[in-house]
Every structure is written in structure tokens, then in C-alpha cells.
Image (cartoon, grey):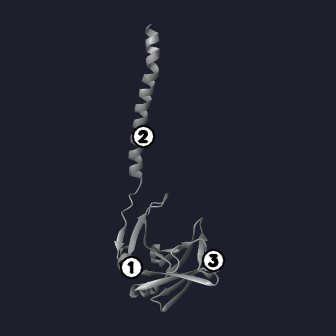
Amino acid sequence: MFCAKQCRMAPRLLTAVLFLCLCGVLAAGGKAAAQGTARNPAPVRYGDWQKNCTTPPGTPNMICELTQTARAKDRPDISFRISFIKLPQKKGVLLRVIVPIRVELPMGVGVNIDGAKDMGNMLYRRCFGDSCLAEAVLTEKDMQNFFAARAVSFFIFPTPEEGVGGTVSLNGVKAGYDSLP
């Protein structure tokens, strides 16, 4: 009789002990995980631009970028995501433009400041499942052109004959740029 009663209670007792152990492990793991990850600050607005900072997995340093998204004037299905990222050791500024996948790659992304200053074309670096990425390294002189302007237009080519443009305001770009680490 003694064994029968304890044998019925043993599975419940074992389940309770395992549950408490699991709770302890999860609580300790949660504290360790919280201590081991850097907290990313909330995005900050600078005029029409937004500063976003993240810590990529496996890296100790936070990366900050100044971003703005715009839609093409005549094609609302096409959007541009523009980012400025300061490079380490003051080696310039990375201008990154992300556009939809359906573009002519050899044409690149055209850049024009205030409708008057042609900055040339940025070459595509790579394409992902739903977008393509064009990048250019800018000098401090190039950045001064952006700071002095009111707007910049970006042009892509869904077909060799059809250029599509989107314009972004440069309101706040100087203050946002100055805040980048």
C-alpha cells in the first residue's frame, strides 16, 4: 500500500521538480541574455530624416544611419530608401539607395541635387529577394553639396527607355549627419 501511493505521486513530484528547474534555467538565461546584448536606442527625427542605430549580430559596435524613404512621382509602387552612414576612421560617407528589384542594373541610380547639379550614377552592389542596393562613397565636399541644397532626386530605370524619379527633402540632413557617430 505504501509503494502504491508513493508510486502514483512520483510522476507528479518529478513533473513539479522539473518545472521549477526549467523556470530557474529560463530566468537565469534571460538575465544573461539581457546583460549580453546592447540596447538599441529609439529612432530620432531630424527634420525629414530619421537616425536609426542598431547593433548587428556578432559585432560589438553600434551602426547608425540617417534615413528617409520616398515614393516615385508617377509610380507610387516604386519607393526609394536613402541612407547616409559615416565610415570608420573618417574615410568618407556611404550613400546607400535601396530600390525595388525590377530595375535595369546597368543604368544604376541617377542622383541630382536641386534639379541642377548632376552627381552622376551610383552602381548597384547587389540585389536581394525584393530589392537592389546601390552605394557610393561620398567625400566631405560631396556632403557640403547636400547640406547646401533643398532636395535631391534619385532616378532608376525599370526599362532602358523609362526613367522613374523620386525626390527627398534635405530638411534636417545636416543636423542628423552631425549627430552620427
Residue type pointed to by label 2: Leu
Residue type pointed to by label 1: Val
Residue 180 seen in the current view: no
The image's mark for residue 105 is 3
Q: Pointer 2: residues within 10 angstroms few (<14), some, or many (20+)?
A: few
User: Split into 4 quadrants, where in the image is the C terminus?
Assistant: bottom left
Task: Judge whether 26 appears above or below 63 on screen.
Answer: above
Q: Is tag 3's residue or tag 2's residue first in the polypeptide sequence?
A: 2
Cα separation, mark 2 vs mark 1, equals 44 Å
Point out residue 100 in the picture as x, y percentages from the top left corner.
Answer: 56, 72
Q: Residue shown at 63%/78% (left/top)? A: 104
Judged by depth in the image, the label closer to the viewer, 1 or 3, is 3
Kindly indicate the quadrant of the structure image that contains residue 134.
bottom right
Point out residue 98 in the picture as x, y percentages from the top left corner.
Answer: 53, 73
Residue type pointed to by label 3: Leu
User: Split into 4 quadrants, where in the image is the N terminus?
Assistant: top left
Task: Judge whether 88 appears above or below 1 on screen.
Answer: below
Q: Are marks 1 and 3 in contact (CB under 8 Å)?
A: no
What SS does tag 1 mark? helix
Q: Residue shown at 52%/80% (left/top)? A: 74
Kindly indicate the quadrant of the structure image that contains residue 49.
bottom left
State the residue position of label 1.
173
Cα separation, mark 3 vs mark 2, equals 49 Å
Q: Is tag 2's residue or tag 1's residue first in the polypeptide sequence?
A: 2
Judged by depth in the image, the label closer to the viewer, 2 or 1, is 1
State the residue position of label 2.
26
